[in-house]
Image (tube, coloured by chain):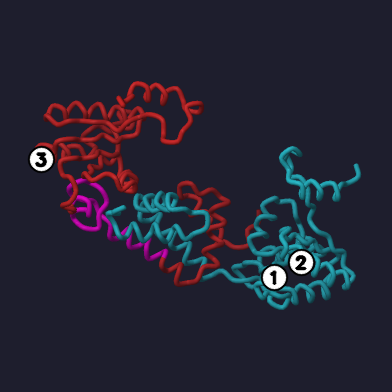
Chain colours: A cyan, B red
């Protein structure tokens, strides 16, 4: 394929490196950028630069923050006795998008994975233990994905946090709302039966 | 949803404006940018800036080009007697990606659309007529989409180009390769029967 522009080629290649963007989408995006007003392109570039320059990590929960403490940790109307443990900062946004959780968060910044050389020391766990020891934390919810690493991390944290006398829970596994039993996989069905609730 | 970073919010909003990118993809991209190495982000930004600054229009075909004449129009091994007419510069790349077309192109930069106030004068048609009149053009292939505007433009161009004594063809409409008759729509089946070829 003889592409008539090196610059277009370059941008398509850069876009293709982003997650979920194949060559066709990258080409579509590059042509869109080509036809965009200069101000709009500048706004996009400024957003990227500002993000890389200004964003930091909250010293309390480890989530992303523009200031020393993130807006969630600063918010006094939230329930400081409840901490939800997530793998990464993005999971905070996912749970926040429901608008139904009013506790705080703690971001592990990864999962225990001996194969990749990631032990508990590499994660944001010591500050969690400190938080749980000094504050009025009454419950910790483990909201990690159910992968081998996620389950290992869940078990590890459940053990050390229980020793501190804190109630430790895990988010429910079962059939997604609106899903059909017929199309569910075996593991999900087993989890949904094991985790059945009384009516 | 209380997003802990204004900068992240800004970038997610800018990404959401791009075609084919919803809020979830935009959020995924923004987090990817957040975790990207600074050099990689700079390379992405440089590509956008270079594209906007350096890319131009080929004075012959109207396609995109880094120089006065695009690499396709400059290429003397291509068949200059054959011109494929497309709606926009992106269609050139789509046809080039097959690697099977060796003629030249002409980019209309739009389609005739009286409702939007776009007549033949607004399109890159006068230079096409000049090209067809002065050069050794023997055939013009119309490769416009089969929308109301595409068909109107095809008919308009077929009429004026035939008057110049040039052979005018249109790309075939029919069943896509590998498609099943059972799932084809009526219009496509009708076109495929009308356009049947002798074996």
Magenta part of the chain: B44-73
Residue hosting label 2: A152
Relative to B193, does residue A127 appear above or below in the rendering? Answer: below
Q: Determine the image quadrant of residue A158.
A: bottom right
Relative to B133, does residue A49 appear above or below in the rendering? Answer: below
State how far apart marks 1 and 2 are (Cα): 8 Å
Q: Marks 1 and 2: CB-CB under 8 Å?
A: yes
The dot on residue A153 is none
Horizontally, residue B124 falls left or right of residue A19, namely left
State how far apart marks 1 and 3 are (Cα): 68 Å
Q: Determine the image quadrant of residue A109.
A: bottom right
The local secondary structure at tag 1 comes to loop
The dot on residue B136 is 3
Q: Nearer the viewer, residue B126 or B134?
A: B134
Q: Can residue A61 be seen by looking at this rendering? A: no
> Residue at 87% of width from left, 73% of height from top?
A164
Q: Is residue B56 magenta?
A: yes
Relative to B183, does residue A163 appear above or below in the rendering? Answer: below
Q: Determine the image quadrant of residue A92.
A: bottom right
The local secondary structure at tag 3 comes to loop
Q: Is residue A92 magenta?
A: no
- Image quarter in which the C terminus of chain B is found: top left
Q: Residue furthest left?
A: B134
How many other residues sit within 10 Å of disc 2, few (<14), some (14-19) or many (≥20)?
some
Task: Chain letter for mark 1, please.
Answer: A
Q: Nearer the viewer, residue B51 or A195?
A: A195
Relative image position of residue B175 (x, y in whole percent): 41, 30
> Residue at 59% of width from left, 63% of height from top?
B5
Task: Chain letter for mark 2, please.
Answer: A
Residue hosting label 1: A113
Horizontally, residue B59 falls left or right of residue A118, namely left
């Amino acid at each position: 394929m003889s592409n008539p522009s090196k610059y277009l080629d370059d941008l398509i290649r850069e876009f293709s490196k982003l997650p979920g963007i194949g060559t066709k989408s990258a080409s579509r995006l590059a042509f869109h950028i080509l036809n965009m007003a200069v101000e709009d392109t500048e706004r996009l570039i400024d957003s990227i630069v500002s993000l890389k320059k200004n964003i930091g990590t909250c010293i309390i929960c480890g989530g992303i923050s523009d200031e020393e403490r993130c807006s969630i940790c600063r918010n006094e109307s939230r329930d400081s006795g409840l901490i939800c443990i997530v793998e990464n900062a993005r999971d905070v946004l996912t749970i926040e998008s429901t608008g139904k959780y009013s506790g705080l968060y703690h971001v592990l910044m990864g999962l225990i994975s001996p194969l990749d050389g990631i032990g508990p020391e590499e994660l944001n766990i010591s500050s969690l233990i400190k938080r749980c020891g000094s504050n009025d934390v009454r419950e910790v919810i483990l909201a990690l994905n159910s992968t081998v690493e996620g389950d290992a991390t869940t078990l590890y944290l459940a053990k050390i946090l229980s020793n501190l006398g804190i109630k430790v829970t895990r988010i429910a596994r079962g059939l997604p709302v609106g899903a059909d039993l017929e199309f569910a996989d075996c593991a999900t069905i087993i989890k949904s039966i094991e985790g059945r609730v009384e009516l």
